[in-house]
Image: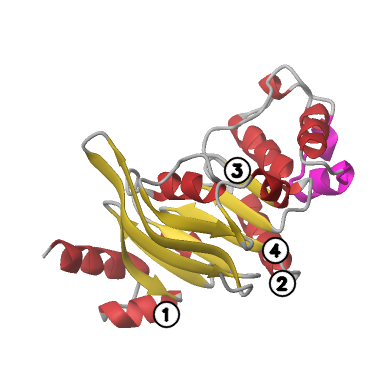
Amino acid sequence: MSEAFAVDVDNVVKSFGTLRALDGITLRVRQGEIYGLLGPNGSGKTTLIRAIVGLVAPDSGNVSVLGHSMPDLNILSSVGYMTQAAALYPDLSVEENLRFFAAISGADGNVTEVLKTVELEARRKSVVSTLSGGMRQRCSLACVLVHHPRLLLLDEPTVGVDPQLRVQFWEHFRDMAAAGTTILVSSHVMDEAERCQRLGLIRFGKLLGEGSPAEIRAAAGTNNLEEAFLKLSGRASE
């Protein structure tokens, strides 16, 4: 695997019984890039991210992360993975959750800095179970940022987050990418897809198209990503 790529997925297939969740997916994510996986629920986005992080073993194909063939426990301290469902300890405070996740990643972490980023500094002593859904989402993001990962995997990170904070999240993602962090984010929201440098359109476990938002629109001959996605989906099913 070239050092230019933080993620290298080569012809990955994964089935669950008769359901083929990933059907020969091949993609590469460059170092310091914001790459978006765009597709509806059930398209294979989460399964692909879980395969990348090593939680799902492909039936065939290969996955490399930061130059390491997965699964490789030695690389996980350099990876941050935010799941769709909040992976938090509800009986601990916000700060205790952050310190715990920093510790298991082998890092001290700047808790105060990260809490400011997600606007939870005033709630650092609050027990997670008392937080609103949006605040729990912010806390989940803080927990994957606290150890300053080289690769950030975000599975629908802004669900339940208000529009103003969503903009702030994306500003922070751009700053992280500019500093060298690679970000792979899944979404089914078109305006978020426009914020990515490159996109992979995924449906029925297959990659329908790949490129910058402008390149994908041009390839489909449309003016917006939603129309492009629908058009490419139609071509793939023909």
In the rendered image, which quarter contains the C terminus?
A: bottom left
Q: Give the range drawn in magenta.
A: 108-124
State the image coordinates of residue 105 (x, y, percent, origin top left): 77, 41
**Label 4: how many Cα within 10 Å (few below 14, some 14–19, many 20+):** many
According to the image, label 3 marks what residue? 82
User: Between 225 and 238, which is closer to the camera in this rendering?
Assistant: 238
**Residue visible at 42% across and 63% down?**
10
Q: Is residue 60 above or below residue 137?
A: below
Query: Type of residue at label 4?
Result: Thr
Q: Which mark is residue 178?
A: 2
Labels 3 and 4: the sequence-earlier one: 3
Mark 2 touching mark 4, by CB under 8 A? no
State the image coordinates of residue 13 (x, y, percent, origin top left): 33, 51
State the image coordinates of residue 41 (x, y, percent, origin top left): 35, 44
**Residue visible at 72% across and 63% down?**
176
According to the image, label 4 marks what residue? 181
Query: Type of residue at label 1?
Result: Ala
SS at mark 3? strand
Query: Type of residue at label 3?
Result: Met
Q: Residue 148 carries which label?
A: none
**Label 1: how many Cα within 10 Å (few below 14, some 14–19, many 20+):** some
According to the image, label 1 marks what residue? 214
Labels 1 and 4: the sequence-earlier one: 4
Labels 1 and 2: the sequence-earlier one: 2
Judge depth for marks 1 and 4 and give the one in front: 4
